[in-house]
Amino acid sequence: MRCQDMVCVVTGGGEGIGRAICRALALEGGHVAVWDVDRVAAEAVAEELRKSGRRAEALEVDVSRWDEVKAATRQVLAWFGRIDVLVNNAGICQVVSIEQTEEEDWDRVMAVNLKGVFLCSKAVMPSMKERRSGKIINMGSIAGKIGGILTGAHYSASKAAVMCFTKSLARELAPYNVQVNAIAPGVIETNMTRMITKGDWGPYLSMIPLGRIGSVEDVATVAVFLASRESDYITGEIIDVNGGQWMD
């Protein structure tokens, strides 16, 4: 029970990697606030966690809107009294060339993927600093290191910025004993990637030394490690979860 009684907020927790992280945190003893722009999906995950014996609450939140993020943070603090872990997982992507990317597309991807990380982090920082304890886990991507593989350039740019933001935030919060790290997944099998690849994983398998596509659980186990006390002396780190596709 590495996350026993920790209060965890997971953005984009209604499906895919976010849902797997919610499940993994609960399995390790955490209480989870599931944030998602899709209220129905968030509530479904929360109900699943409640049935497993953990406390869970669902909130409909657009992480790109400061008013919604502030209100959701206040609500979680009212429910649980504190926030021990924030997982900034919410994100969107779009498969499109740079030439065909519209200004509105660029702005929306940046608003959710990058601004959302900033706003959610900003919202939980005061309480974590006051308690001199906390973990913030951001979701980067292999695309932010080497450019888009399944996704557009605006997605790749947003994830590169998230990983740089992670290091800046880690430096700022280190004096308060708050650790900030990021996970950089490679090709992970989710509804989103299945839609993009149409189920043809062949071109990607040839680039992955471990010879398989990643699962959402592969990412979730790393999130649990970063949420737990086991990572107390790690901050500003970007952990690759890509089967060896990119090594640095």
Image (spheres, rainbow, N blue to C red):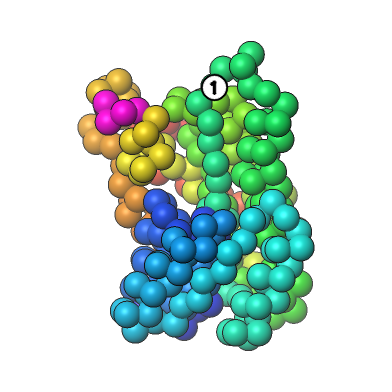
Residue 125 or 189: which is nearer the viewer? 189
- Under circle 1, the secondary element is loop
Q: Which residue is drawn at 46% across and 63% down?
A: 40
Which quadrant of the figure has residue 74?
bottom right
At 44% from the left and 61% from the top, the residue drawn is 41
Residue 43 belongs to the span the image colors magenta? no
Name the residue beneath numbered marker 1.
96
Residue 119 appears in which quarter of the rendering?
bottom right
Q: Residue at (23%, 32%) from the top-left corner?
A: 211
- In the rendered view, tell whether residue 47 sits above or below residue 220: below
Q: Which of 40 and 95 is in front in this view?
A: 40
Amino acid type at mark 1: Val
Residue 209 visible in the current orientation: no
The image quarter containing residue 181 is bottom right
How many numbered tags mark residues here?
1
- Residue stretch in magenta: 197-201
Q: Residue at x 44, y 42 (%)?
A: 185
Residue farthest to the front, as pictured = 40
Quadrant containing the N terminus is bottom left
Q: Where is residue 10 in the image (x, y as percent from the top left)?
A: 52, 63
Residue 52 image position (x, y, % from top left): 31, 79
Secondary structure mainly formed by the magenta segment? loop
Q: Is residue 70 left or right of residue 41?
A: right
Q: Which of 47 and 181 is in front in this view?
A: 47
- Given residues 224 and 38, the one toward you in this image is 38
